[in-house]
Amino acid sequence: MASIAIDGPAGAGKSTIAKAVAKKLDYIYVDTGAMYRAIAHYLVTNHIDIEDEKALAEACNQVTVEIQYEKGQQQVYLNGENVTPYLRTEETGNMASKSSAKAPVRAALLDLQRNMAKQYNVVMDGRDIGTNVLPEAEVKIYLTASSKERANRRYKELIEKGEQPDFDKIEADIIERDKRDMNRAIAPLKQAEDAVLIDSSDMSIDEVVDKILSVAQTVL
Ligand code: DC
């Protein structure tokens, strides 16, 4: 089985790009952020204080996260319930950024991620795939973009949904989330030594996809 690891900060376009690369290669796309979001959803809805180590450990023992593919789309099941529709909210994203720094949360998901890469050819995106989850991945990409550009993309997304977002707040949230993801003690976001750096600030989606496919072609 072959693996393509795509890591990078929030809003760099990882999921759009990873999905497109997976489709081209007929690989499975694995969105690990959605798994962290599923646990975050559990923690929010059950009012778990993540600073309470005992409560957090108990909660992590009680959750099972499973991935299924329906019509080619990843669906995340939390304790048997499909929670995919609840995962993309700001509240869940913010909790995921905080709770994913905690050891029991990361431990709960590591085997699931590694097992998927054992079973299938995967394009897996996240923060620590190339550095920690799949250090032997054949292709490693570190995909980033400036915080302004990432905020801009998010802003446009929300406008399209009919919301009235505040640009400065979006950018401040992105910077805050980067800080948390990069500075945590366990599996922080960083570029693996053997990862190819792609800054997508001034690139189209197609350009980024082509670049990754050309990197993949040299090794797969
Ligand atoms: O990619 P995303 O925004 O859906 O991820 C949500 C949070 O999950 C993100 O703030 C950091 C965390 N995460 C992580 O720690 N490790 C991963 N492999 C993927 C996501």
Image (spheres, rainbow, N blue to C red):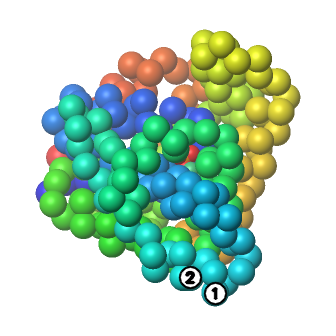
Residues at circles 1 and 2 in contact by the CB criterion of under 8 Å: yes
Q: Amino acid at mark 1?
A: Lys
Q: Dot 2 surroundings within 10 Å: few (below 14), some, or many (20 or more)? A: some
Residue extending furthest toward the bottom: 54
Identify the residue position indicated by label 1 in the image.
54
Q: Amino acid at mark 2?
A: Ala
* 54 relative to 18, above or below: below
On screen, residue 68 versus residue 124, left or right, reads left
Residue sitting nearer the eye, 46 or 51:
46
Residue at 82%, 24% (x, y): give it.
166
**Which dot marks residue 20?**
none
- Determine the image quadrant of residue 206: top left
* 135 relative to 177, above or below: below
On screen, residue 177 versus residue 138, left or right, reads right
Residue at 19%, 64% (x, y): give it.
118
x and y percentages locating residue 152 in the rendered image:
69, 22
Q: Is residue 218 visible?
A: no
* 186 relative to 40, above or below: below
- Secondary element type, mark 2: helix
Residue at 33%, 72% (x, y): give it.
111
Identify the residue position indicated by label 2 in the image.
57
- Determine the image quadrant of residue 53: bottom right
x and y percentages locating residue 143 in the rendered image:
51, 40
x and y percentages locating residue 31 in the rendered image:
40, 47
